[in-house]
Amino acid sequence: MINIFEVNETNQMVEKENLDVRTITIGISLMDCIDSDLNRLNEKIYNKITTVAKDLVKVGKEIERDYLIPIVNKRISVTPIALIGGAACKTPEDFATIAKTLDNAAKAVGVNFIGGYSALVSKGMTTADELLIRSIPLALSTTDFVCSSINVGSTKTGINMDAVRLMGQIVKETAEATKDKDSLGCAKLVVFCNAPDDNPFMAGAFHGVTEADAIINVGVSGPGVVKTALEQVRGESFEVLCETIKKTAFKITRVGQLVAKTASEKLGIPFGIIDLSLAPTPAVGDSVAGILEEIGLERAGAPGTTAALALLNDQVKKGGIMASSYVGGLSGAFIPVSEDQGMIDAVNDGALTLEKLEAMTCVCSVGLDMIAIPGRTKPETISGIIADEMAIGMINQKTTAVRLIPVIGKDVGEVVEFGGLLGYAPIMPVNEFSCDAFVHRQGRIPAPVHSFKN
């Protein structure tokens, strides 16, 4: 049983070490909204979301007040829209009307983001899937809070290279459609392999078809807390280092468990999972790179970085699963460049490259995240980067993702400002040797041999 004494123990973490509950996310099934009439479909979607999530922001503020724990975001995820709009939508523009409905619903209930403008195409694309994907540039350029995710691969099915090729084009088109905002639309678009059904973090959140009608998922974050704890054991053995991370992750997750259970009771919606990902912010001291440097690296990206990150990710998971019976989502360490001041510094110092970031994704949560690249980068090159990251997820039986931002009109050496939690990012160089012939092959990369487990 979680009690107020445990909450009091976290006061210093909150006040001095940037501990926060990053998000309370309500997952909402839209399966009962399906209709062949587009107007009725949009009406049903709006009514369902605004009814189920009407008290989310209010309850979040009540929990913040009662426990003095910051809850940075209140969010919604919905059933992948490609599954919901197939009967009514005949064109990409039809799907974009649903994006507008989602945006209006998000604004009506006061949440920060709404995710689930999504399609699951790891083995093939239906007509509805392809229409939704082709609508993404329009959808993200005409809405404020809608986030989109496309799952193009899995360990069980392989990688749908037709979808990978298409997503390279869509990322570039989305960048062009939002170039007046430094291609910000791409910050709300993520490409997945092995996407989880219960992820509360944006831009990749959607409400999986295996979930209940509505569910509460909570994401907790505390890179600053972990770094401060490690400062107390500087120079100690790996055993002490690992024990410290585990104990700290346990305490962080207990805070999330309390918030999740309280929100569940107040909203009358079942508790789903705690995602204990270490998600950084641009705030000083709230950096995953800072943890890696405290472990013993001069800069993130130095030799030893992948090993240090593997250690961190594993110990966070080990500590978290002892604190909650329902740990899920992504759970681990995020390495988004624009959202982590330490990562930005490492890029500027020449310690961290795109290739080193790719290597790091083999052992941490998610993948190539919030990376700004030159706006002139070819769609095929973007597809090649996506394919590489999908292969890491497929072979290693883990979730990987790509959120690249080709900033139209900017090149290597320039900086792009996104603002808020999205931070700012230096434009990183991309290998310019061609992969066109590879990307333009048709079909899919088969599932690896270890996928055949039954």
Image (cartoon, rainbow, N blue to C red):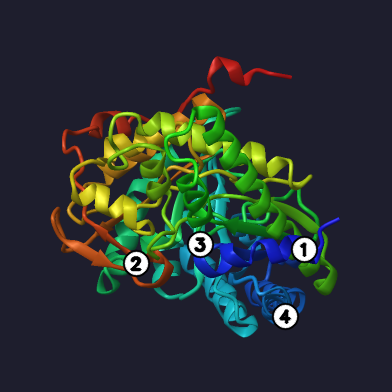
Q: Label 1 belongs to which residue?
A: 5
Could you tell me the amino acid type at mark 4?
Glu
> Is residue 302 in sight in this rendering?
yes
Could you tell me the amino acid type at mark 1?
Phe
How far separated are the C-alphas under marks 2 and 3? 29 Å
Q: Earlier in the sequence, mark 3 or mark 4?
A: 3
- For numbered disc 3, what is the local secondary structure? loop
* Residue 62: image tag: 4
In contact (CB < 8 Å): disc 2 and disc 3 = no
Q: Label 3 belongs to which residue?
A: 17
Residue placed most toward the observer, 39 or 335: 335
Task: Please tell me which residue is depicted at 62% across the width and 52% down the height of the picture.
Answer: 199
Q: Label 2 belongs to which residue?
A: 184
Kindly report which numbered mark, 3 or 4, lies closer to the viewer in this rendering.
3
Image quarter of residue 340: bottom left
How far separated are the C-alphas under marks 4 and 2? 32 Å
Kindly report which numbered mark, 2 or 1, lies closer to the viewer in this rendering.
1
Q: Earlier in the sequence, mark 3 or mark 1?
A: 1
Could you tell me the amino acid type at mark 3?
Glu
Q: Earlier in the sequence, mark 4 or mark 1?
A: 1
Q: Position of residue 344 (x, y in %)?
A: 28, 54
How far separated are the C-alphas under marks 3 and 1? 19 Å
